[in-house]
Amino acid sequence: MARIPLQVEQLVEQYGPTPQRTPPGGWPYHGEPDKLVATHCCFCGQQCGINLKVKDNKVIGFEPREDFPFNRGKLCPKGIKRYMQNEHPDRLLRPLKRSDAGFVPISWDEALDTTVSEIQRIQKTYGKDSYAMLSGVSLTNEKSYLAGKFARVALQTKNLDYNGRLCMVSAGAGNKKAFGIDRAANSWADIPLADVIIVTGANVAECAPITTDYIWRARDRGAKLIMIDPRVTPLARTCDLHIPVRPGGDSALMNGILHVVIERGWVDQNFIDNYTTGFESVKESVKKYTPEYAGELAGVDPKLIVRAAEMWGPAKTSFLLHARGIEHHTKGVDNVLSCINLVIATGRIGRPGCGYATITGQGNGQGGREHGHKCDQLPGNRDIENPEHRKYIADVWGILESEMPGKGNTAQEIIELMHAGEIKGLLSQCFNPVVSLPNASFTKEAFNRLEHYTIIDFFLSETARHANIVLPGSLQEEDEGTTTSAEGRVIRIRQAVDPPGEAHIDWHILLDLAKRLGRGQYFPYTCAEDIFNELRVASKGGTADYYGITYEKIEKTYGVFWPCPTLEHEGTPRLFENNVFYTPDKKAHFNAVEYRPPAEVTDEEYPVVLTTGRVISQYLSGTQTRRIGALVDMYPEPLVEIHPTHAERLGVKTGDLVTVESRRGAVTLKASVVTTIREDTVFVPYHWGDDKSINLLTNPALDPVSKIPEYKVCACRVRKSESGS
């Protein structure tokens, strides 16, 4: 069984996280760098340009990359300190095997042979689909593509999914339903041209800081900013209108705004009549969402709904941005569609200053969800259940269509199957589900029940503690490749240094495993560009068409926006120009949305809403950022944000310990008493594991379409801890 071999405290002492505060060579490193490598930040989906300073095969610092058009040298705190994970004392340098005494170093041959032997044993005993693969989307496009192919061709399992299931899938499903394509409609260059901007469910200033610059440039020319969030986030402190929606009330709120827009005659009837379908159904469905009714459901003053409509409705140009705040729900797809309904009702899309976009959270959250990394998807954003799509990709891969597995289970469902004993073995790569999935105690027990678990990663994460075999992989700057930014811009990742010690480049590990599984002939790559060139062919003709993108073309143009179907094509920074969409009828589709309550609502026993999110100095499960001292110092531990009125009832002051408890678990953390949150809600960031993991409490209920968990709302109760302060 895949149980951790030692006490958590012992593993932390050996493998961290250890906050590193001094770079290789100290402050400062003496001498000039050997080279300056122009590449990109390894963290969020903005993928800001950065120059890494390299000396003696070590990244020793950075310089602003002012030539890259997205950020023009600007970086957030994570970007500035990202190089501090290089030469880290926690870095995994040799393969490890779990023993009764902890993890012990072994040879690569033993590690790979043991993994392959266990894969073969499990699949022979229980069937091909009893072995699963989970992977991350901070990986390059090449590695994401390879993960999908490896699972289906080498492992021959249907059970593959990715941690983007916890990020962008609600947005992707909504976009495909309305527009026929899953990508931001515009490059960020259109944001400063907007007269009104709605940001809903997105703490832009902390989670996508460089996007703040684009919004501020719009405001400098007079644009109005509407922020919709249960908290007064940093960007909301100076906005023109803040709507403190109750967590879970998003679709009711958007229906209410659209109700007023229709009532006041601010729709673009010509656009609706000629370029859309389904408007009459939506018009009828929002009739009942008066400001009063919508306000009651959303927990806001009806006047705020009217004011938002008055700002959005008559504007000449506008832009709507959203992120996980509206997507991490059991009705996340509905929330997305309610936003899209408002955008296309006013016809403001597909032209300068008029657009709509989802802010991608993970480093390659866009590219990682396009090329077969998902359980229901094949490269080019094709459908794994579509016979024509299956045949095309099977031909590219050189296999029979009948050999290709069908649709598999999603990340949360895979964990549930592990817990139920139906999935017996797992290979994972750069994914930390013990911290990042909801109901963490259940997740840990699911890992405990595996017969064998191998992980590829560069640090020993909370999940890696459960592994039987640990294979040391590579950081972003230790390999060549591409990623795709939140804008849909395909960019170049350049290798700055080699992996340290005996660590290997991730895709080399997969190729070695494929060879030992007897499937090496399907993976004849000698470099990352070979993988990308196959990806180009595999994506050709799909909605996410990369065929016309080459490494050389990316280098010349600072990135290429997909779709780019031919070598002569210059890319597509703005979708839907000339009002042509990617649906079969080439029209944008309205989708009527009826408000549904969250899967779990408050009651007398659990009267408070818990919502979760990010802080500026941390990234996702914190595997990387909790090891960078300067980022840890900015926000050393998770805090419970609580309104003063609520805190007074509990007798709690800032710094006091409070216990937050849901039906699934409890944590005791320090309180932060703030006026910037709803009185009925508490907020806790999710970047920490073990006894500080807020995902011990969160609800694993899933959106029926996207299968994303409902991180943004569950019922809890809060009390002052008996431990005091």
Image: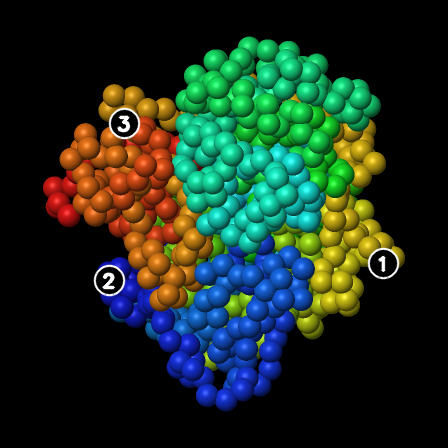
- Amino acid type at mark 1: Leu
| Residue 240 appears in the picture as rendered | yes
Q: Earlier in the sequence, mark 2 or mark 3?
A: 2
Few, some or many C-alpha atoms within 10 Å of disc 3 (few <14, some 14-19, many ≥20)? some
Q: Position of residue 540 (x, y in %)?
A: 79, 51
**Which residue is painted at 39% across and 81% down in the image?**
26
Q: Earlier in the sequence, mark 1 or mark 2?
A: 2
Residue 629's image quarter? bottom left
Residue 452 vs residue 185, the one in the foreground:
185
**Which residue is painted at 41% across and 27% down in the image?**
246
Q: Which residue is mark 3?
A: 606
242 relative to 280 in the view: left or right: left
- Amino acid type at mark 2: Glu
| Residue 665 appears in the picture as rendered | no
Few, some or many C-alpha atoms within 10 Å of disc 1 (few <14, some 14-19, many ≥20)? few
Q: Position of residue 73 (x, y in %)?
A: 59, 64
Q: Of tags 1 and 2, which is closer to the observer?
A: 1
Q: Which residue is mark 1?
A: 567
